[in-house]
Amino acid sequence: MDKSQEQRRFSLESRRYIGCKTKLVDWIFSLINENAHDIHSFCDIFSGTGVVAHRALQTYERVVVNDFLHSNNVMYRAFFAPDEWSEEKVQTIINEFNDINPARIGENYFSKNYGGKYFYHDTAKIVGYIRGRLQTLQKDLTDKEYAVLMASLIYSIDRHANTMGHFDAYHHKAPVAHQFQMRMIDAESYNGVEIHREDANQLARHINVDLTYLDPPYNSRQYSRFYHVYENLVQWKKPELYGTALKPKEENMSDYCRTTAFTAFTDLVSHINSRYLVVSYNNTYHSKSSSSENKIKLEQLEEVLNKCGKTKIFNHEFKAFNSGKTEFDDHREYLFITEVDDEKRNQSFPNVLRG
């Protein structure tokens, strides 16, 4: 691989992910800067791709990053963690991976399950082989090196996946043939970052920050099911897969994608020890697809946040990343900014004890 190929590294924002805030991050932080004051610590409690946390890390002294998915957690460790690592060592390993001849390696768990379906068969063979090698190499790598290699693998196959951007289904047409090349991500290091993989409602009971940003899932589409291939690749437990979408048994299912969403959200905001709450919301309850309908209504959010303190609401016309044929009318992104009044919140939620 030539030097130009080595230099073209994946940015954090280049991964396909439903609900990603890449195109909204400037708008979000401009409103935060105008309406929240004396902010030194920030928590992104449903971090997703991490684009909001990434901006926060460039702005604030301490940033808590959290998501329950294993694949997202490895991204944060790769892109953000200040741990020691050798770029030269990682690039050497990537160069070795790029010399793999698929004709000279055998079938593996990844190729047997996903080859010819989610990925071009030779690519699936190489990915499965690389994942096995990473398992062997892990003992000789720092956590950052291992995370950078894992994240680089995922980013390198993301655009080649035979999907609309998630793994709820693959195209019936066979994957396009190509020569797989792995590229490194653009990893950075931030001393002020704290990385968690916890249930947001449980983490909320243990953090103390100036501002908490909340962007929970609002519809019935479970992220652990949408991105099950990456979850499977990172965990490498090699479970039995089911159905045409080749999903493992359910795990990491979110209450925010069920009828319990409003109860979960109320519990969350009543427990967060934070001077400001900033909540992103999009009005997909107008969607023509039942799976895209929001489990929490705009009015419900406004009601519960007003119980926490003075709340301002902003909105912005936005065409979201749409992974399928779902149609949206007047799709808008809303941002709630609440200045928390602890006395008012305690009176509003008398049965909740924050600890």
Image (cartoon, helix red, strand yellow):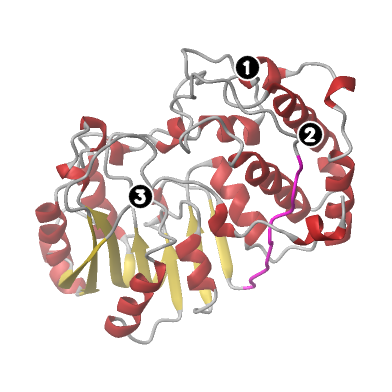
Q: Position of residue 70 (x, y in %)?
A: 56, 41
Mark 3 or 1: in front is: 1
Dividing the picture into quadrants, the one containing residue 230 is top right
- Crowding around mark 3 (Cα neighbors within 10 Å: few <14, some 14 to 19, many 20+) is some
Indicate the amino acid at tag 3. Asn
Dividing the picture into quadrants, the one containing residue 118 is top right
- Res. 187 mark: none
Label 2 element class:
helix
Q: Is residue 313 left or right of residue 333?
A: left
What whole-number distance in Å separates the C-alpha atoms at marks 3 and 1?
Answer: 35 Å
Q: How many numbered marks, from 0 up?
A: 3
Q: Position of residue 72 (x, y in %)?
A: 54, 47
Query: In this orientation, does residue 318 appear?
Result: yes
**Residue indicated by mark 3:** 201
Q: Main secondary structure of the magenta part?
A: loop
Label 3 element class:
helix
Marks 1 and 2 in Cβ contact (< 8 Å): no
**Residue indicated by mark 1:** 113
Q: Which segment did they paint magenta? A: 181-191
Q: Give me the residue at 28% from left, 34% from top.
A: 220
Q: Position of residue 299 (x, y in %)?
A: 9, 55
Q: Along the polypeptide, which appears first: circle 3 or circle 1?
A: 1
Q: Is residue 91 left or right of residue 254?
A: right
Q: Give me the residue at 70% from left, 42% from top.
A: 153
Q: Along the polypeptide, which appears first: circle 1 or circle 2?
A: 1
Q: Is residue 138 above or below residue 350?
A: above
Marks 3 and 1 in Cβ contact (< 8 Å): no
**Residue indicated by mark 2:** 130
Q: Is residue 187 magenta?
A: yes
Indicate the amino acid at tag 1. Asn
